[in-house]
């Protein structure tokens, strides 16, 4: 019996270590800076931030985002989180078919009443499979994709595949909703161009959020839509919430005007890189030769492939008893033996201990199935 397995039986009084929560650790949050920005934003903007405002968002922030993406502010819709933007785009476009990645973020899977899928591998979305899915469509379908540090796998779409996707969109064979909340949370490597940049924003809609770069509780996301669509969205947005939460948007703008985003990103990247490295190191120590996992260059998550025949949902029950949680891959459309591990919330020491607990739980589950295993990752 391994030491980690022996330890797992003595940890009942300890707090559960969560690899399920896709949220930043408290120390990633710029609390003092945001408090000061809030005081300034409300004192300066007063009624503009506290009354009803523009339906499509706080106008000064719309203008800041428009300058960032080199577009007309009329194309920017600032929302209460990026998932709200997803709802608005779906309602406005009313696509006949929606295609998602397999696996993908579980919220769109729950929102959509029906969808097609194309697989994700180590280089991101399989564009060959996507083209087969698209073939025969009477009208261009809508692809929802997270090309950079994808949720749940952590993989990034290669530049070659990005260019192929942009060509498909440019040829009007496909419309794309590019969800990019993690792109700035990069630990190493050069960032590839976004699909929006490659295609020019005619058939690619770009969505992002300040949840991962500043704080999720602000609930500030945005979407850059094709020309004319912003005006079409006004009635839909107004019927949803009249106006979004403008105070949070005013705080974000003050944060930007003070030049706080870049140093905050540097701090967040350092904190999350240490957590990613702790998880990769612990997985190598505990599960080498027994499982496979992705090696993300940024973001919040990595993808774990357990031995063939392992039921991740069953393992979750055993792991929870041992004081560690995760999300089974089947929640995202993945295989039954897969799991998403979030390294964003737990500390490096907790991650190290949590992976030991997970390995002990897997050992117990595997013993009941004959001790199965798979080759170690290269």
Image (cartoon, helix red, strand yellow):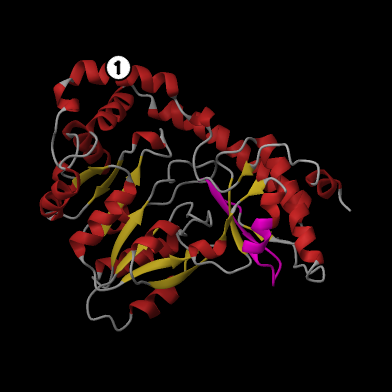
Residue 203 visible somewhere in the drawing:
no
- Residue 369 picture quarter: bottom right
Question: Toward the viewer: 67 or 213?
Answer: 213
Q: Tell me residue 49's x, y (percent).
A: 19, 27
Q: Is residue 271 above or below residue 149?
A: above
Q: Check the image and name the residue furthest to the bottom.
A: 136
Q: Tell me residue 122's x, y (percent).
A: 55, 63
Provide the residue span drawn in magenta: 295-317
Residue topped by disc 1: 39
Residue 258 visible somewhere in the drawing:
yes
Q: Tell me residue 302's x, y (percent).
A: 58, 52
- Residue 18 picture quarter: top right
Describe residue 144's horizontal placement relative to residue 29 as left or right: left
* Residue at figure coordinates x 13%, y 37% from the top left: 54
Q: Check the image and name the residue furthest to the front.
A: 13
- Residue 306 is one of the magenta-drawn residues: yes
Looking at the rendered structure, the secondary structure element under dot 1 is helix
Quadrant of the snapshot with the C terminus: bottom right
| Number of numbered tags placed on the structure image | 1
* Residue at figure coordinates x 22%, y 40% from the top left: 66
* Residue at figure coordinates x 35%, y 34% from the top left: 218
């Amino acid at each position: 019996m391994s030491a980690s397995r022996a330890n797992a039986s003595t940890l009942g009084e300890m707090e559960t270590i969560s690899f399920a929560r896709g949220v930043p650790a408290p120390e990633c949050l710029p609390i003092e800076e945001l408090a000061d920005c809030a005081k300034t934003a409300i004192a300066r903007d007063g009624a503009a931030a506290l009354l009803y405002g523009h339906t499509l968002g706080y106008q000064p922030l719309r203008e800041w985002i428009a300058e960032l993406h080199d577009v007309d502010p009329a194309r920017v819709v600032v929302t209460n989180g990026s998932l709200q933007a997803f709802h608005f785009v779906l309602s406005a476009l009313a696509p006949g078919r929606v295609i998602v990645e397999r696996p993908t973020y579980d919220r769109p899977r729950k929102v959509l009443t029906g969808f097609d899928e194309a697989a994700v591998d180590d280089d991101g979305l399989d564009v060959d499979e996507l083209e087969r899915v698209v073939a025969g469509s009477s009208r261009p379908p809508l692809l929802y994709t997270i090309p950079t540090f994808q949720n749940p796998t952590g993989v990034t779409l290669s530049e070659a595949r990005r260019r192929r996707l942009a060509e498909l969109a440019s040829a009007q064979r496909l419309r794309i909703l590019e969800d990019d909340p993690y792109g700035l949370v990069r630990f190493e490597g050069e960032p590839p161009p976004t699909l929006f940049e490659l295609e020019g924003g005619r058939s690619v809609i770009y969505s992002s959020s300040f949840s991962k770069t500043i704080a999720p509780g602000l609930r500030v996301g945005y979407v850059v839509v094709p020309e004319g669509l912003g005006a079409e969205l006004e009635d839909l947005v107004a019927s949803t919430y009249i106006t979004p939460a403008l105070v949070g948007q005013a705080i974000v703008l003050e944060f930007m005007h003070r030049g706080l985003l870049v140093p905050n990103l540097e701090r967040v990247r350092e904190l999350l890189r240490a957590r990613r490295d702790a998880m990769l190191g612990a997985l190598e120590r505990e599960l080498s030769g027994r499982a496979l996992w992705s090696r993300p260059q940024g973001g919040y998550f990595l993808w774990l492939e357990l031995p063939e025949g392992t039921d991740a949902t069953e393992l979750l029950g055993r792991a929870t008893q041992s004081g560690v949680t995760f999300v089974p891959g089947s929640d995202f459309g993945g295989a039954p033996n897969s799991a998403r591990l979030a390294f964003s919330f737990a500390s490096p020491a907790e991650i190290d201990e949590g992976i030991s607990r997970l390995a002990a739980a897997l050992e117990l589950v595997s013993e009941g199935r004959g001790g199965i295993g798979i080759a170690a990752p290269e």
